[in-house]
Image: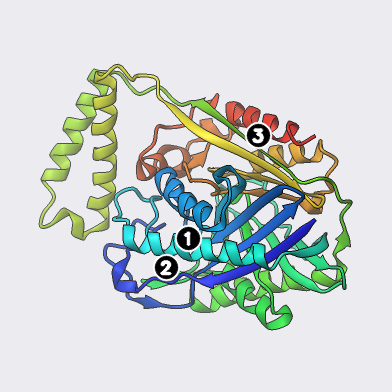
Amino acid sequence: MKCGFAQTIITPRPADVFQDGYGFRLHAAEGVRDELYAKVCAIEDGDFRFAIVSLDVCGLSPALDREVRGHIAAIAGLCPDRIAICATHTHAGPACGVLRDLPINGLVWAQIAVLAGRAAKEAFEKAVPGRFAAAFGRDLTHLHNRRFRKPFDPRVRTAVFLDEAGAVRGILASAACHAVVNTSYLLSADFPGYLTREALRRYGVPALFLQGADGDINPYFGGEAFSEENLALLGEEFAACVLDAVPSCSPVEARPARAAVVRGTLPMRDYPDEDTLAGKLAELEARYYACPDSPTDAVPQRILLRELLWTRDALARVRAGERHPTLSVPAMAMTAGGLGFVFSPFELLTLTGQSINAQLASLGIPDAARFVAAYANGTNGYLATASELPSGGYEFESAPQWYGIPFCSDKTEGAYLALTAEAAAALK
């Protein structure tokens, strides 16, 4: 097996983009706190070629994912189904379709895609024989379950690719924690950016961050407000957790590289009936049009607008006979050099991430070598964990309106887990 790594800066001009991830930002970015990167891990095993692409962005809409994937595939000479495009989920990158009301700068994204494609091509050109080694780093301490429940996974996975001389050629890392500390109008990779810089300083190699099942996990600083100091605190801790584990990484038993993509349609929650939606829409319109001044100048009006537009769209669909919505998604699984991956197009909560991890365990892959990557190959909002759905909350009741998608039902998670299980089973 061969593997190569490359990275390139993709930071756009601040004035050209809005920032994705926070509903209270109402205008374009004002500056750059730290650079955004595209990073690539290129894998070759005989005729098998696969690229893991990590972008410092919030999470691509399915439509934008297709556009970016097309450019990368063309430049790197890859089959589109042999590319995993992963977002680090920083809430300070360029608008990418997570908050559906933000304008996406198509020219900026075409350039980002070209840069990522060139990095993928470079990574394959740098590919050398070697093997993977993996280990758990120290647990993250500055995080908590924001739904005030016990399940969370503070573990940090580290995998390194070693060439035949034993030198580190690249690093893969995974943890589960929302990258939301930077709330300013400055473009930023948030806490994962510290790993980028420290990996270059210590080892001179790219370090790809694959965001885990962080849908219910936030940074936590003892009740203090987010700040520049807290961003450094979490970022430095995360980088140390990953890089201090590099010397202790143990070789993973190699197995042939394989990948599988299974596409399916998930059942979502039924829309309310026409009369209920029409009544709700009339109420929302009355409230919205009564707002003083320009409704786009204040966060409360923007939140109200999201609900109004979602309700209007739902009503149109119901009148067109679409009372029972569905969501079409891919489930991608891959093994390479003994590592196992599932790339998910959702914001995954902890319990769902644990279920997918168990599917990789059934393949005999060691725990430290299992990577469950969320925000990959498109982003379709939060996947509601069936057992937690009755408790409601932002993730299940408000976020879908920002994403512009139907609400999850109690059958959605199970249907998606059936897809990931099928993809994982195809790797045996």
Sequence-wise, which precedes: disc 2 or disc 3? 2
Q: Which mark is residue 183?
A: 2
Q: Is residue 61 left or right of residue 148?
A: left
Q: Residue at x 33, y 48 (%)?
A: 100
Residues 273 and 91: in front is 91
Q: In the structure shown, which secondary structural element does the residue marked by tag 2 occupy?
A: loop
Q: Is residue 172 left or right of residue 114?
A: right
Q: In the structure shown, which secondary structural element does the residue marked by tag 3 occupy?
A: helix
Q: Position of residue 353 (x, y in %)?
A: 66, 43
The label nearer to you, 2 versus 1, is 1
Question: What residue is pinned by disc 3?
Answer: 420
Q: Residue at x 63, y 57 (%)?
A: 210
Residues 376 and 6: in front is 6
Residues 375 and 424: in front is 424
Q: Is residue 27 left or right of residue 127?
A: left
Q: Quadrant of the C terminus?
A: top right
Question: What residue is pinned by disc 1?
Answer: 57
Residues 230 and 260: in front is 260
Q: Residue at x 38, y 50 (%)?
A: 97
Q: Which amino acid type is marked by label 1?
A: Val
Q: CA distance from mark 3 to mark 1?
A: 24 Å
Q: Position of residue 279 (x, y in %)?
A: 20, 25
Can you say whether 130 is above or below 375 in the image?
below
Q: Which amino acid type is marked by label 2?
A: Thr
Q: How many numbered circles does the render carry?
A: 3
Residue 96 location, quadrant:
bottom left
Residue 362 location, quadrant:
top right
Q: Which amino acid type is marked by label 3?
A: Thr
Q: CA distance from mark 2 to mark 1?
A: 14 Å
Sequence-wise, which precedes: disc 2 or disc 1? 1
Q: Which mark is residue 373?
A: none
Q: Position of residue 263 (x, y in %)?
A: 56, 31
